[in-house]
Image: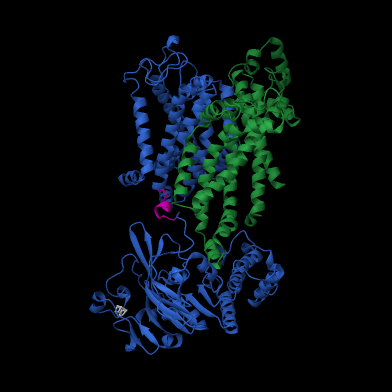
Chain colours: A green, B blue
């Protein structure tokens, strides 16, 4: 509960920063915000809606008040309320990023642990090498290569999109479309998580309590799982929270490459069309969701670690 | 600096990364003077040529432009933008961080709050918002990427500054009347520089990738200007028909980022002292044993350690922690093992069941005879069935030796279950609780679901003792079990051990640096110095009259009530370093009785009755 309250200043800060950035736009705000949609009626309307003739702090408060009521303004390029569009798109992003996040957490920890437990063996070297490639390859390039190989050449998966245009729409169809983009999105984060897990596990293996477990005669496998991994997960959790941000960020590229109808693609389109209100709404909405996600990670950490309970 | 480069160069991967980067950077810098075709001349007739067609080494793109030329110019642009972004982020981030760290208090609070807010964003959203406000364009993308990375620098530099600001030379500068601002510029900034450079080297790859990413999205460089990202972005529409146009810029970005990662890792490893010491090496479940199939001498005793030599190999140095050590423990005997810290007593004790962290530890030779088998040469599974079952340990600091995330109850049960106990679940629990009572924990139920950090040191050590006893072992090895505790608690723990010992006829190997503790508990004692046993005999006789000068010094260290001078006595001088032990007596540099002979010849062991010692000129002429 306390953690939830502590989110309030952060969320306020996010809104202030976004608001300030958007207000940086040089020139008449109404024209700037509307861009190519700056018809006289629209200008008059937005001036009234947002109180653009008022001072900066006043405008912020009005805007904030609207947001709290769930009103993120209206997109001019799409001619619909921002919140409706964002919610719809966010759903798609969540499916993609969530899958990639789960993938990178499990795979990363698994691979990193194996690598540490087999330090300096061929397995370890092989994993380290793959991880190095994984963290160096730009996800958008990887995505393109995957499309070329698995979709175009091998015809294993659809080239792009979230559902098939004809006759799709069910879960198997979604999964079929999800495989490539989620893997492409997860690769970099998996590499990072694997690296950190490997180091964490190596560090923990040197701890006195591992020696105690060995002195007790506990089997090496259960030492690894119940002693080492247990602590490793607690130390890796904050990193996972951070990685979620990276996955969410990377999803912008992946959504473009795979034509995934998510928030990232919406934002890029909106920027190119100079639909500032849509950008503003999308950024604020997703950022706030991310704040709450991090709170959840924090709470989970407390649950798993009795020392900070 | 030279040393540093040497270390980096030794790391083959880092060197490879460095060279790869160097080649790329050189080529891109040389782009203006290389005999390249014009990057921006379009010639639709020549579009989508494959590599080597029509004199285009890498082929042409969708407008018939020479790809090699575009690649090098694009690389130059991408590198320049990435480095510029890193530089801007480093400058502003470091300034913010240094100010926050140096002035502290309110300034710190305000700045760091702001930084935290920036970090609350998924970074690309912030970048997108900035680009949205400023409009697409390479310069704006650069600004966005730089801004987004400011928090990283601010945080790191703040941390370093805080530690610097508390250093003595800063205090001195203050006292000499230097203004805060001057201190910041003259004293602190030069010390921050290496840190800033490192932070830059670890993030520049990121920033190149990020700016390329924004360009890829069409938000960065605008045509005809092209960096690697926008080249890839333009090539995407022809991905399926002409993939080579995508490969060219894509692989280049990959090479740059990998080069920076490899090189950066090498730099970090070279600077991280932990890695130098090789401490991030995983200790094997069993110490490496190089004694082959050494057969131990037959022995009638419970356990007989024979010619044990354990070494640590760190970098080029060999530390001889336990040097040809031999001793025996009888059934029901409590044998003390005493020495200063670093004398090799713990290593000796851990060697018995191959628990020495390895690498870097190696058991060079020797054997441990337990029931006519050499413990050191046992296969892992057989050793495991002895550890904690027949031979168990109690360690020094129960806070670090108990697992922090498991309850006391679970840890006790685990010790029991590790050895396939035939007890049912409820029997196991009641046996564990019974044991907790026997170490004078009156209400085991209250303790069962508690975590180690919630207990006092004394309670924790009782738990450890109970855990060591749980499989009714034949030998308990107690490695300084009372050292981390208060004096009164120490006495309680010693009492518990003493009464358990009598009740259960336990054999104990009790390690301590304190003759007072040893004399309360042990029958016999062996004294170790610099990895070797220097004296051995019944505790009573040795306390009365030590033979080895080192032993008598150790006895002098025992605090005596009412004698304040004694309470503070510690042996003057330091033991020799274990990687360069002297020819003669290792104690010679601290010994009052030293003669020339002691320095030249290695000292033989003399023994008489049940005592032995390793000294040419024993104290009080005991010989
Ligand atoms: S051998 Fe010599 S130097 Fe060594 S302890 Fe004995 S008297 Fe001292």
Q: Please provide the residue range marked out in magenta.
A: B271-279
Relative side of B450 to B51, left or right:
right
Relative to A57, is B348 above or below? Answer: below
Q: Can you give x and y, in whole percent of width and height, for residue B159 in the image?
A: 50, 46
Give the farthest residue toward the right. Answer: A69
Is residue B206 shown left or right of residue B263? right
Whether residue B275 is in magenta: the answer is yes
Q: What residue is shown at x 65% (from left), y 73% (from top)?
A: B436
List the single residue furthest toward the front: A154
> Taking A3 as reference, is B87 above or below it?
above
Count how many numbered circles sit on residues in the image. Answer: 0
> Looking at the image, can residue B348 be seen?
yes
Q: Is residue B78 above or below residue B551?
A: above
* Quadrant containing the C terminus of chain B in the rendered view: bottom left
Residue B300 in the image, given as x and y percentages of width and height: 46, 83
* Residue B65 pos. (x, y %): 42, 15
């Amino acid at each position: 509960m306390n953690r939830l309250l502590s989110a309030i200043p952060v969320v306020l800060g996010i809104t202030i920063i976004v608001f300030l950035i958007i207000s940086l736009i040089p020139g008449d705000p109404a024209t700037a915000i509307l861009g190519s949609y700056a018809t006289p009626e629209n200008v008059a309307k937005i001036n009234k809606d947002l109180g653009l003739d008022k001072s900066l702090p006043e405008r912020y408060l009005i805007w904030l008040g609207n947001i709290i009521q769930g009103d993120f303004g209206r997109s001019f390029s799409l001619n619909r309320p921002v919140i409706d569009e964002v919610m719809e798109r966010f759903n798609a992003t969540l499916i993609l990023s969530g899958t990639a996040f789960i993938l990178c957490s499990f795979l990363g920890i698994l691979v990193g642990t194996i690598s540490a437990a087999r330090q300096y063996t061929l397995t370890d070297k092989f994993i380290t090498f793959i991880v190095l490639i994984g963290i160096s390859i730009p996800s958008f390039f990887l995505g393109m290569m995957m499309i070329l190989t698995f979709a175009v050449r091998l015809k294993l998966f659809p080239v792009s999109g979230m559902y098939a245009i004809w006759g799709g729409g069910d879960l198997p169809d979604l999964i079929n479309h999800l495989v490539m983009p989620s893997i492409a999105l997860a690769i970099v984060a998996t590499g990072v998580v694997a690296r950190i897990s490997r180091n964490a596990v190596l560090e923990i293996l040197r701890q006195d309590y591992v020696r105690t477990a060995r002195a007790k005669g506990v089997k090496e496998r259960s030492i690894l799982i119940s002693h080492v991994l247990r602590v490793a997960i607690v130390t890796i959790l904050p990193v996972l929270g951070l990685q979620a941000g990276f996955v969410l960020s990377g999803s912008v590229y992946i959504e473009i490459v795979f034509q995934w109808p998510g928030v990232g693609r919406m934002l890029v389109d909106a920027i190119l069309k100079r639909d500032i209100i849509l950008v503003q709404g999308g950024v604020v909405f997703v950022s706030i969701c991310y704040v709450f996600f991090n709170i959840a990670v924090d709470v989970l950490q407390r649950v798993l670690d009795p020392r900070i309970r | 600096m030279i040393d540093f480069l040497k270390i980096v160069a030794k790391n083959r991967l880092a060197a490879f990364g460095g060279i790869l980067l160097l080649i790329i950077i050189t080529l891109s810098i040389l782009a203006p003077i290389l005999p390249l075709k014009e990057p921006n001349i379009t010639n639709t007739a020549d579009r989508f040529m494959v590599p080597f067609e029509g004199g285009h080494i890498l082929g042409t793109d969708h407008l018939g432009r020479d790809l090699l030329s575009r690649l090098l110019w694009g690389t130059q642009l991408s590198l320049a933008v990435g480095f510029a972004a890193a530089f801007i982020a480093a400058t502003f981030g470091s300034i913010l961080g240094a100010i926050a760290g140096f002035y502290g208090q309110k300034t710190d609070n305000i700045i760091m709050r702001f930084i935290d807010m920036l970090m609350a964003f998924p970074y690309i959203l912030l970048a997108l918002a900035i680009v949205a406000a400023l409009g697409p364009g390479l310069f704006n993308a650069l600004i966005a990427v730089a801004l987004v990375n400011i928090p990283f620098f601010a945080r790191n530099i703040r941390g370093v500054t805080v530690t610097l600001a508390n250093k003595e030379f800063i205090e001195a500068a203050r006292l000499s009347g230097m203004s805060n601002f001057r201190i910041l510029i003259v004293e602190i900034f030069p010390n921050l520089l290496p840190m800033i450079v490192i932070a830059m080297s670890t993030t520049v790859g990121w920033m190149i990738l990020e700016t390329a990413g924004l360009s890829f999205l069409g938000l960065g460089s605008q045509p005809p200007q092209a960096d690697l990202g926008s080249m890839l972005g333009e090539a995407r529409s022809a991905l399926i028909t002409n993939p080579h146009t995508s490969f060219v810029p894509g692989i280049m970005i990959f090479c740059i980022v990998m080069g920076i990662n490899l090189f950066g890792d090498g730099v970090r490893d070279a600077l991280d002292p932990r890695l130098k010491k090789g401490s991030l090496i995983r200790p094997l479940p069993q110490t490496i044993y190089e004694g082959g199939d050494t057969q131990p001498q037959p022995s009638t005793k419970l356990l007989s350690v024979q010619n044990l030599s354990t070494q640590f190999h760190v970098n080029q140095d060999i530390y001889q922690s336990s040097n040809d050590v031999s001793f025996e423990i009888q059934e029901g005997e409590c044998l003390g093992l005493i020495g200063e810290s670093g004398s090799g007593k713990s290593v000796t004790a851990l060697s018995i069941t191959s628990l020495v962290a390895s690498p870097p530890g190696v058991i060079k030779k020797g054997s441990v005879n337990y029931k006519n088998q050499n413990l050191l040469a046992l296969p892992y599974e057989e050793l495991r069935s002895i550890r904690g079952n027949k031979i168990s340990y109690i360690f020094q600091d129960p806070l670090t030796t108990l697992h922090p995330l498991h309850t006391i109850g679970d840890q006790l049960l685990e010790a029991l279950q590790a050895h396939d106990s035939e007890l049912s679940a409820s029997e196991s629990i009641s046996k564990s609780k019974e044991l907790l009572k026997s170490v004078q924990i009156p209400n085991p139920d209250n303790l069962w679901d508690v975590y180690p950090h919630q207990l006092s040191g004394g309670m924790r050590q009782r738990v450890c003792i109970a855990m060591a006893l749980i499989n009714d072992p034949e030998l308990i090895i107690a490695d300084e079990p009372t050292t981390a505790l208060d004096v009164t608690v120490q006495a309680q723990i010693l009492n518990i051990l003493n009464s358990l010992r009598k009740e259960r006829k336990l054999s104990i190997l009790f390690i301590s640096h304190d003759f007072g503790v040893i004399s309360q508990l042990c029958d016999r004692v062996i004294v170790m110095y610099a990895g070797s046993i220097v004296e051995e005999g019944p505790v009573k006789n040795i306390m009365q009259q030590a033979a080895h000068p080192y032993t008598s010094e150790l006895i002098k260290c025992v605090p005596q009530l009412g004698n304040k001078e004694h309470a503070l006595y510690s042996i003057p001088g330091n033991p020799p370093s274990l990687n360069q032990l002297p020819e003669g007596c290792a104690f010679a540099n601290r010994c009052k009785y030293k003669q020339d002979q002691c320095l030249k010849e290695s000292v033989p062991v003399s023994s008489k009755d049940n005592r032995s010692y390793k000294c040419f000129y024993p104290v009080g002429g005991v010989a």
